[in-house]
Image (cartoon, coloured by chain):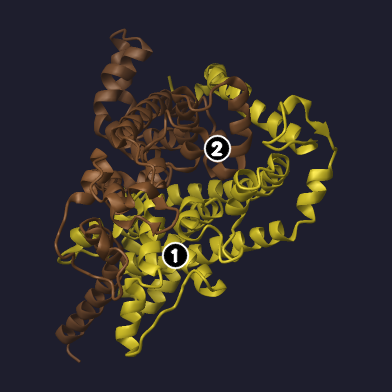
């Protein structure tokens, strides 16, 4: 039963893969294609009698400016929140890489946000940011004036608030990854560099950062993909408003299906998004695979 | 500057930065707890009250026991029996997590010891999780409607098992990989079957790891909102779905009740997270990174 003789047992995976594919993935793809090619909304009769419209729905989605903007917003949202998470998470991890008093407590408190039910976070922040909320009150104390910003009524503050909520929620994720990476790092090269007279900055940029690269890539990719699909917090916080200024792709998809009940359009849209995201995921997985091997090489000497 | 003062300065800088972020992290939590203890007339005041006066547990009574104490708000929210949602959440999260871990464990064992999944295939499994759930929500709804699986336990549990399988597979695999293979070879010499080897030799060795995996996945299934709200009507609505109902049509959100609910939903997760904090890295990085 050495690890090498896998080929003989490969077939045992078949049922585990075949059942979900046959009974879940295949029907889902079928429904997605069927509804995107037929015109059907929840008001109409039975779905199997829907009218065939060919690629009309796809054309509709592709020509829909609101859809384009929702994609752009999603990319900005995911990109910005990922970068901020990384910066803050890394800073925290770097400051905590070596033992000091209160480290354990800081660690526990810092990971708390990612343990909270996402929809609850959305409602919680809504409460902090409303016009009569504590944030405006505190801003008032700082500036000495009465501040009544309605954070959800203006495009840019609203968009900033959905980015911030994502950062608040998921910085802990980057933080624990970075801390694991920093504390699992082999010490020998750093010691050697120090002995040879390298400055702390040189050590950081030429040894620690390159060694940490796989972990950083891992964190960036996982975070970015998750943020692309983020729905509950944004929905609870702004519902895509004001207007559609915080309407990310998942929110627009949700609105199309459950508020406009335009199931066919939603199906075409989700099909397109599925293709786009699958391409991104495929690319990311190739990168991840490469980085994971680098990661294993990194951990081998230290353990 | 002597070495000691430099060290002290570094310490001050460290505690200042960490302290600042700590305030950012804790303030929303503080506000949530305080709001859950406020009487209704303090929910929307300006300037906002920081410390409730008087403290009241009424919100918890309304949110968790369905007692209607503040009648002026009753009409604005349809109060359902919260225990119904609690039982649903416990059942759905519990069963789907157990199934996911069991399945993941078997797959992980096969992958680790027999190479039934190449590394590339293992990574393909991650795709299951990385596709945004909203993309498949509509097709799943229509499919389930056709099968008559809407608002059924089976339907939601299947989705949860499949969507958390990558986590349980990767996480348990990282634990199994740490068990030296010689242990199993010894068991094999004594004539133990493979399943028995897994059950009696490997499993006890990685017991804490399996428990951590179970709890980790419980965090995910317990807090899931989108699928739960899409696939449920009334019968299987879970706690997060219930939580989203505390929005009055006219007065805005029923802050006190909502926060009382959300604290109750969240506290167990925080407790679980703290208990398995050593393994959270493995979980969230799909077992790719150990700590």
The image shows residue B59 at horizontal and vertical percentages of 23, 50
Farthest top residue? B191
* Chain whose colour in the figure is brown: B
Q: Residues within 10 Å of mark 1 (few under 14, many from 20)?
A: many
Tell me what residue is drawn at x 54 percent, y 39 percent.
B123
**Mark 2 = which residue?**
B128
Residue A72 visible in the current orientation = yes
The image shows residue B54 at horizontal and vertical percentages of 14, 62
Callout 2: helix, strand or loop? helix
**Mark 1 = which residue?**
A86
Q: Is residue A280 left or right of residue A162?
A: right
Q: Is residue B32 left or right of residue B115?
A: left
Q: Is residue A171 above or below residue B140?
A: below
Figure colour of chain A: yellow
The image shows residue A284 at horizontal and vertical percentages of 59, 50
The image shows residue B130 at horizontal and vertical percentages of 54, 44
Chain for disc number 1: A
């Amino acid at each position: 039963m050495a690890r090498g003789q896998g080929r003989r047992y490969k077939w045992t995976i078949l049922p585990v893969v075949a059942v979900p594919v046959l009974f879940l993935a295949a029907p889902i793809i079928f429904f997605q294609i069927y509804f995107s090619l037929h015109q059907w909304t929840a008001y109409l009769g039975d779905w199997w009698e829907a009218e065939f419209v060919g690629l009309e729905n796809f054309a509709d989605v592709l020509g829909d400016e609101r859809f384009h903007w929702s994609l752009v917003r999603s990319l900005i949202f995911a990109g910005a929140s990922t970068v901020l998470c990384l910066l803050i998470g890394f800073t925290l991890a770097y400051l905590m890489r070596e033992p000091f008093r209160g480290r354990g407590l800081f660690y526990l408190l810092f990971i708390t946000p990612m343990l909270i039910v996402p929809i609850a976070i959305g409602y919680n922040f809504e409460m902090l940011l409303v016009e009569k909320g504590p944030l405006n009150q505190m801003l008032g104390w700082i500036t000495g004036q009465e501040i009544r910003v309605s954070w959800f009524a203006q495009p840019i503050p609203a968009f900033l608030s959905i980015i911030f909520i994502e950062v608040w929620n998921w910085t802990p994720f980057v933080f624990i990854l970075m801390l694991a990476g920093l504390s699992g790092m082999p010490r020998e090269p750093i010691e050697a560099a120090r002995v040879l007279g390298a400055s702390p900055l040189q050590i950081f940029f030429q040894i620690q950062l390159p060694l940490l690269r796989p972990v950083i890539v891992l964190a960036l990719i996982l975070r970015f993909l998750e943020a692309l699909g983020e729905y509950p917090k944004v929905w609870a916080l702004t519902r895509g408003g004001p207007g559609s200024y915080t309407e990310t792709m998942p929110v627009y998809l949700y609105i199309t299906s459950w508020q406009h009940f335009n199931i066919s359009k939603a199906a075409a849209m989700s099909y397109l998004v599925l293709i786009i995201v699958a391409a991104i995921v495929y690319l990311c997985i190739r990168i991840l695979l490469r980085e994971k091997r680098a990661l294993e090489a990194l951990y081998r000497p230290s353990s | 500057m002597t070495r000691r003062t430099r060290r002290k300065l570094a310490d001050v800088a460290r505690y200042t930065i960490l302290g600042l972020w700590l305030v950012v992290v804790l303030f929303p939590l503080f506000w949530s707890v305080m709001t859950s203890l406020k009487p209704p007339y303090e929910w929307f005041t300006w300037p906002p009250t920081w410390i409730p006066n008087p403290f009241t547990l009424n919100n918890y009574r309304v949110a968790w026991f369905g007692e209607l104490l503040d009648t002026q708000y009753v009409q604005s929210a349809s109060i359902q029996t919260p225990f119904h949602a609690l039982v649903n959440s416990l059942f759905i999260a519990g069963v789907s997590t157990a199934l996911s871990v069991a399945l993941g464990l078997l797959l992980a064992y096969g992958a680790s010891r027999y190479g039934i999944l190449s590394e590339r295939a293992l990574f393909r499994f991650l795709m299951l999780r990385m596709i945004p759930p909203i993309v498949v929500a509509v097709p799943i709804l229509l499919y389930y409607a056709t099968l008559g699986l809407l608002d059924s336990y089976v339907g939601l549990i299947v989705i949860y098992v499949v969507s958390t399988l990558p986590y349980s597979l990767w996480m348990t695999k990282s634990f199994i990989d740490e068990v030296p293979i010689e242990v199993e070879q010894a068991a094999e010499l004594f004539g133990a079957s493979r399943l028995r080897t897994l059950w009696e030799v490997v499993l006890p060795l990685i017991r804490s790891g399996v428990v951590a995996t179970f709890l980790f996945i419980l965090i995910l299934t317990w807090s899931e909102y989108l699928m739960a709200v899409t696939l449920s009507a009334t019968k299987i609505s879970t706690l997060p779905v219930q939580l989203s109902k505390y929005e009055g049509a006219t007065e805005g959100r029923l802050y006190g009740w909502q926060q009382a609910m959300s604290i109750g939903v969240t506290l167990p997760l925080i407790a679980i997270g703290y208990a398995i904090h050593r393994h959270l890295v493995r979980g969230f990085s799909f077992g790719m990174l150990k700590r």
